[in-house]
Image: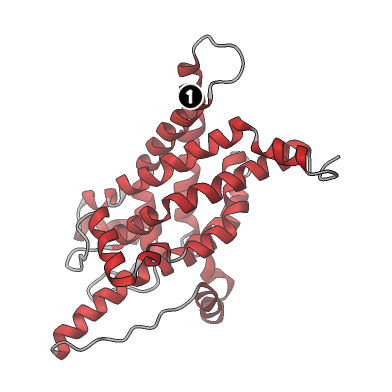
Amino acid sequence: MKHKQVIELINGGIAGLIGVTCVFPIDLAKTRLQNQQNGSRLYTSMSDCLIKTIRSEGYFGMYRGAAVNLTLVTPEKAIKLATVVGLLGLVIVTTPMEMLKIQLQDAGRINAQRKLIGQAAAGGGDAGVRNLTGLQITKELLRKQGISGLYRGLGATLLRDVPFSIIYFPLFANLNDLWKGDVEGPAPFYCSFLSGCLAGSTAAVAVNPVDVVKTRLQSLTRGSQEDTYSGVMDCINKILRNEGPSAFLKGAYCRALVIAPLFGIAQVVYFLGVGEFILSVLPGAWH
């Protein structure tokens, strides 16, 4: 591996770890809002979702699935943030990671929904729901569906991530150059941060309809009144028919709030040269 690639790997990994830790609760709210269908709505907004999550699951309920994300975020974000060329190889990591993350994030919504149904049916009884860990979900998927089970929604992931990168990287470069002006050398760090935030949030909202489809396809457990989908087109048709075009914007502002600081932090980490610094202070780390 070349010196520059090692630096990009370190920078991308550190940026991903910091960013995901900061914005994970918003990402959880996004997943739950996107999975809500007409007739089974528990949350009215991002803040309502987070408040209800804390009340029913505690503070750490907002970080359900974070362990999966943080474990795989170094290779996933490093590839995504370092190069567009590596994007096709990225889904190898992204799809299983998001598949598991979505199950864990949405479990609280399904639990709350089933409890409400159980209480209504049993006059206040509690409908018991089994909570699975990421490892248990992985084993169950492999046992029932094989390795392909972990890659459910692969096509939708590509349809989201390829256009995202096509929008993000050129927009970031142009914004960075615009705000830098005639200054020689690299842009100031605040220009990189703001450019990353704006380009990231713009790209995130632009591809949100595909993200809704991906989230729905990758969700294995559903409420009793919620649709199931056989593929991308079936999902699009059912959403249009049953919920209308506005459903494709569910969680859009959450996604913008997740992506903006994530990519802003990433550009600052690259600008500050964190990877270069780490390699310089570790004797014998690189020759």
168 vs 57, nearest the viewer:
57
User: Which element type, helix, strand or loop, lies under badge 1?
Assistant: helix
Q: Residue at x 13, y 89 (%)?
A: 123
Q: Residue at x 20, y 65 (%)?
A: 41
244 vs 36, nearest the viewer:
36
Q: Amino acid at mark 1?
A: Cys
**Quarter of the image containing the N terminus?**
top right
Q: Compared with residue 132, is residue 41 higher up or lower down, i.e. above or below? A: above
Q: Which color scheme did the rendering employ for the protein?
A: secondary structure
Q: Is residue 267 left or right of residue 159?
A: right
Q: Is residue 42 left or right of residue 110?
A: left
Residue 10 seen in this snapshot: yes
Residue situated furthest top in the rendering: 182
- Percent position (x, y) of residue 108? 33, 71
56 vs 214, nearest the viewer:
56
Residue 87 seen in this snapshot: no
- Percent position (x, y) of residue 150? 53, 68
Q: Which residue is mark 1?
A: 191
- Percent position (x, y) of residue 231? 40, 63
**Quarter of the image containing the C terminus?**
top right
Q: Is residue 185 left or right of residue 21?
A: right
Q: Residues within 10 Å of mark 1 (few under 14, many from 20)?
A: many
Q: Residue at x 14, y 83 (%)?
A: 120
- Percent position (x, y) of residue 95? 52, 59
Q: Residue at x 19, y 81 (%)?
A: 117
Q: Compared with residue 52, is residue 254 higher up or lower down, i.e. above or below? A: above
Total tally of numbered discs in the picture: 1
Q: Is residue 235 left or right of residue 19?
A: left
